[in-house]
């Protein structure tokens, strides 16, 4: 059966590689770093990469909408949201969700862990995902109808039998976050906090990370591509509460993700719930 999004995937892979080439060329040569918040920054390379991606999408798919980390919403037809022509609104059900440089703090400090993330959402669900680590030239990719791939080869999530052997990308912030992290850390081999949620989440698809647990600070562009890739790699992907991981209604940095092999996903959720209950009982 022909994958209806094979062409979109090929386009996204090529585009991610073009943007990744820009990031690589400017790596450790960043001149301007601006503060976005107390913990987050943006560089001129973020803007350059995003402009490259948006221009290419506009040229190839002028009737698609775009959600980009730095510049926000772009309506179908090239206008701002609410100004698209009526005849194009049906096709605007397609929306590209992009993070031109996930891991900007790493990038600005010369830490080699960052990526380009490009996702396509159709009728409210991610259907194409590409996450490129340009320094390693590692390209994770998937469609909703196909397997997760790493550099063109099918990959699958971890098959480790014991949670105690897991290496987990773990970042839980907010009230009770430290207690919940400690509870998980006690049951696994070791946690890691890498600084690029999209790349760490996509890595679950290949077993490089056995699981990913994160909340707060995650926005749609962090998870659109990587969540799909992890899912197509065989991982079970949900919110920290066990609900759907993709929620277009949550526009701020308030998403949460638990991605893990099916045999251990419920176990991780139970540990998180138990830790939360313990914290709340102590108040």
Image: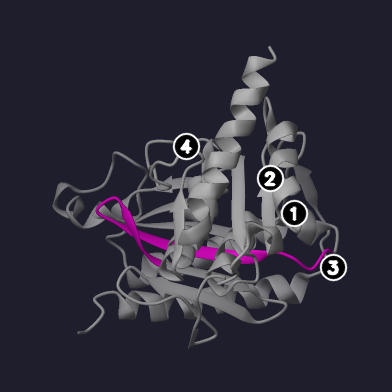
Tag shown at residue 191: 1
Tag shown at residue 184: 2
Query: In the rendered structure, are the residues bearing label 4 and label 3 in contact, judged by CB atoms less than 8 Å apart?
Result: no
Residue 43 versus residue 146 in the image, above or below: above
Which tag, 1 or 2, sits closer to the chain's start?
A: 2
- In the picture of the structure, the residue carrying the numbered disc 4 is 241
Residue 54 in sight from this viewpoint: no
Q: Residue at x 59, y 38 (%)?
A: 272
Query: How many neighbours does mark 4 have within 10 angstroms: few (below 14), some (14-19), or many (20 or more)?
Result: some
89 vs 240, left or right, is left
Residue 201 in sight from this viewpoint: yes
Tell me which corner region of the image, top left, top right, bottom left or bottom right, holds residue 175. Answer: top right
201 vs 42, left or right, is left
Q: CA distance from mark 4 to mark 3?
A: 39 Å
Query: How many neighbours does mark 1 have within 10 angstroms: few (below 14), some (14-19), or many (20 or more)?
Result: many
Q: Nearer the viewer, mark 4 or mark 3?
A: 4
Query: In the rendered structure, are the residues bearing label 1 and label 2 in contact, judged by CB atoms less than 8 Å apart?
Result: yes
Q: How many labels, in total?
A: 4
Which tag, 4 or 3, sits closer to the chain's start?
A: 3
Query: How many neighbours does mark 3 have within 10 angstroms: few (below 14), some (14-19), or many (20 or more)?
Result: some
Q: Nearer the viewer, residue 279 or 156?
A: 279
- Specify whether residue 263 is painted magenta: no
Q: Which residues are magenta?
A: 111-128
- In the picture of the structure, the residue carrying the numbered disc 3 is 28
Q: Nearer the viewer, mark 1 or mark 3?
A: 1
Q: Secondary structure at mark 1?
A: strand
Q: Secondary structure at mark 2?
A: helix
Tell me which corner region of the image, top left, top right, bottom left or bottom right, holds residue 44. Answer: bottom right
For this orientation, the residue located farthest to the top is 283
Q: Secondary structure at mark 3?
A: loop
């Amino acid at each position: 059966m022909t994958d209806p999004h094979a062409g979109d995937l090929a386009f996204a892979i090529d585009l991610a590689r073009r943007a990744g080439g820009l990031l690589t060329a400017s790596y450790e040569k960043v001149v301007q770093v601006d503060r976005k918040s107390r913990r987050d920054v943006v560089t001129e390379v973020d803007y350059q990469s995003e402009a490259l991606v948006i221009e290419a999408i506009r040229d190839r798919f002028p009737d698609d909408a775009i959600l980009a980390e730095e510049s926000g919403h772009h309506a179908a037809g090239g206008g701002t949201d609410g100004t698209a022509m009526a005849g194009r609104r049906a096709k605007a059900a397609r929306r590209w969700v992009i993070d031109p440089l996930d891991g900007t703090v790493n990038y600005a400090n010369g830490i080699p862990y960052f990526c380009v993330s490009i996702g396509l959402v159709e009728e409210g669900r991610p259907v194409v995902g590409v996450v490129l680590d340009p320094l390693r030239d590692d390209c994770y990719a998937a469609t909703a109808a196909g397997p997760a791939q790493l550099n063109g080869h099918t990959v699958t999530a971890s098959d480790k039998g014991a949670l105690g052997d897991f290496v987990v990308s773990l970042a839980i912030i907010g009230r009770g976050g430290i207690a919940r992290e400690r509870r998980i850390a006690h049951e696994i081999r070791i946690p890691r906090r890498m600084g690029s949620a999209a790349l760490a989440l996509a890595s679950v698809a290949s077993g490089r990370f056995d699981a990913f647990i994160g909340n707060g600070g995650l926005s749609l562009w962090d998870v659109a591509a990587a969540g799909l890739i992890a899912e197509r790699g065989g991982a079970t992907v949900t919110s920290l509460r066990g609900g759907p991981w993709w929620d277009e209604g949550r526009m701020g940095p308030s998403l949460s993700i638990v991605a893990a092999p099916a045999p251990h996903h419920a176990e991780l959720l139970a540990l998180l719930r138990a830790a939360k209950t313990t914290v709340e009982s102590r108040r």
